[in-house]
Image: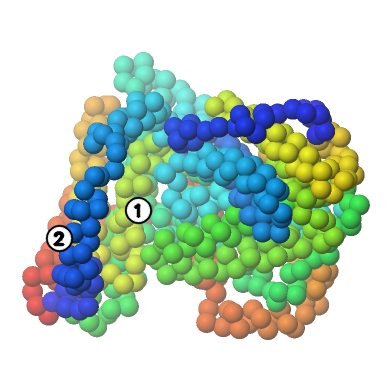
Amino acid sequence: MDESSKLGMNRTGAQMAPINTRSMREAADRIGAEPARGETMGAAAVRGAYVAESGTVGSVPVPGTVTGMVKTGMQKLMGRAPEAFVDKLGERLAYERTGVRLYEALMAKCQALQGTDNALPLDELRVHRDDEARHFKLLERCIEQLGADPTAQTPCADVIATSSLGVLQVVSDPRTTIPQALNAMLTAELTDTAGWELLIKLAREHGQDDMAQEFERALQQERHHASEVQRWLEVQVLEPA
Amino acid sequence: MILNLFEPGGTPLDQQRFTWKDLVREPISKLDDDAFTRVRVILMNGIEQEALRFSHMMSRQSPPALRQALAEVRRVEHFQATMINWLIGPDHSPLETTIGYEQVAIEVTAAIAQKEPDPYVAQVLRFGLLEDFDHMYRYSALLDRLEGKDANNILQGYTDIVPGRPTVDEHRSPEDDLRDPYRKDADPLTKLHSITITAGEAQTQNYYLNIGPLFADPVARQLYAEIAAIEEQHVTQYGSLVNPTESWLEQWVLHEANEVYTYASCVQTETNPRIKQIWQRFLDYELGHLAVAQHWFKEIERRDPAEILPTVLPSTIDFSSQREFVRKVLREEVDLRASGTQFVPREQEPPRSREYRRQLNSQGSPSNAVAAGYRWAAGTELAREPELATIE
């Protein structure tokens, strides 16, 4: 059984302090009968104003080399602005690189639990980790091929890093169980799969059919990762140890 | 920029006002703004935090009329701190912001060390510099190996990522962290440098103490615990430079003068016009604060501020890469250690500090664990890894 699902002294619910919470409810209804001033939509209006006034998190960098300039310029001549493609390539590169570290964190957790029922096959995790590293290298090559800088953090790379911080926090926490970590990894892998699907379409749109073919292979591997992670998770949650 | 510190000027205190909307502005861009814009933002947040800390302490020792003046100025300083610190965008992970903090520690310490007129104080600055320099290396390894990110996305090529004085060796007995205070008649620039560097190190200590527990990874939690301890040592070191015979009012005047000095440095060098406008506004505010502090200095102590301040500002802080200077200090001084208030070759370090760190490191060293074998590469250390064979 998933070891996170044990009974214990969890104090968070109202039912754990029935007298106090009843008193609080009465206070909210009586003393707080007149809630805070302000319009219900006030916060939304503030947020809307900031959205309207704000710029973006940043830009896609201009190529740092002369050959890069030339290549990018040629793409533009063909009527296709490469920025969105470079941005998404940068996103996937950052994601795969973080993916390597996520699998390393998961492997460290599993290593410590070797011999228990919850341990995952380390050799298979290693394959996933190496796949992510290989995808990172592939993207590095592709970005260079377009004359762009694979070491730059593009806007989409920046934003996806913010969204994956939660996954990292779950997997690197020594208190989380393997199923809890797998659940977070599933979020990462499903997002990754969708990311590759989109990237393949973008590559084709930019006439990069060779790249698209390589990305197809990466996508197959990522689909395999996602289904493996999902299977491991189901085994751990559904089948009692 | 020529600013006369004794002429009335600046924004009068009663016209220094804010609204929530004014305070909470669009942050700087992590990707597009120059790294030195972030350096200035972090430094000036530290300067304002110091203003608040100092003012609260002084207030406890002050009569009611002075307490009111301090409270009025302090309220504005609080809002200045708010507006400045809120300029750091939320797409900076706490660890990325940490890289920014260490860049401040390295570049600002190196810049002022070169302008410091007192050779002993300059030596103290160089000593601290090499320790923060090593922190940059350790945190960069953590950022790479935990989040899969390249610290140079933050540093933008201005600051090297290599080992300095090893963090594991920086832990010293408290008596080896105290320094000799500057003389009562020290050059004003020495006094301003001491306040600036103490402010920077204290905000770093606070920042690490606050964000350390946000990390789930135990190595990260240990590393923040370890480096926060060095920042405590640095605050001890730099704080002890201040001459203990300076009165509270004298120190208040110096603090306000330092804020004028640091904001003026920011105005001179800022490349983002939106941020430059903030520095200019706050420079005018600080001239107003300095006038208030000088008024009370004259009123209560019956002393002339010209005793302690220069008429015009000394040359401003050079916010630019100090790479060559840092490399030179690293080559020549990495093996220095502290013995009481003096600096000695490694072999002469007192047994008390060796014993102190032997005990502290006896269950392992986080800074060594995180950076074992680490060599920075553009695009993270994974970019150095040989290509793995494809598995179909």
Q: Residue at x 31, y 69 (%)?
A: A107
Which residue carries the number 1 mark?
A165
The reply to the same-chain question for discs 1 and 2 is yes
Res B162 → quadrant: bottom right
Comparing A222 with B384, the one in front is A222
Please, what is the three-letter code of the amino acid marked with disc 1? Leu
Say which mark, if any, is on residue B325.
Answer: none
* Colour scheme: rainbow
Mark earlier in primary sequence (1, 2): 1
Give x and y (percent) for residue B254: 77, 46
Q: Residue at x 80, y 73 (%)?
A: B340
Please, what is the three-letter code of the amino acid marked with disc 2? Gln
Give x and y (percent) for residue B13: 65, 34
Can residue A130 be seen from the camera position used here?
A: no
Which residue carries the number 2 mark?
A230
Is B128 on the left-hand or right-hand side of A163? right
Give x and y (percent) for residue B289: 70, 38
Is B360 on the left-hand or right-hand side of A190? right
State which chain disc 2 sits on: A
Give x and y (percent) for residue B320: 68, 39
Comparing B26 with B114, the one in front is B26
Say which element carries label 2.
helix
Q: Residue at x 64, y 42 (%)?
A: B73
Comparing A75 with B15, the one in front is B15
Picture layout, residue B372 above or below residue B313? below
Comparing B220 with B23, the one in front is B23
Res B335 → quadrant: bottom right
Residue neighbourhood size for the residue with mark 2, other residues' Cα within 10 Å, grouped as few (<14), some (14–19), many (≥20): many
Res B163 → quadrant: bottom right
Picture layout, residue A104 above or below residue B39? below
Q: Quadrant of the C terminus of chain A?
A: bottom left
Say which element carries label 1.
helix
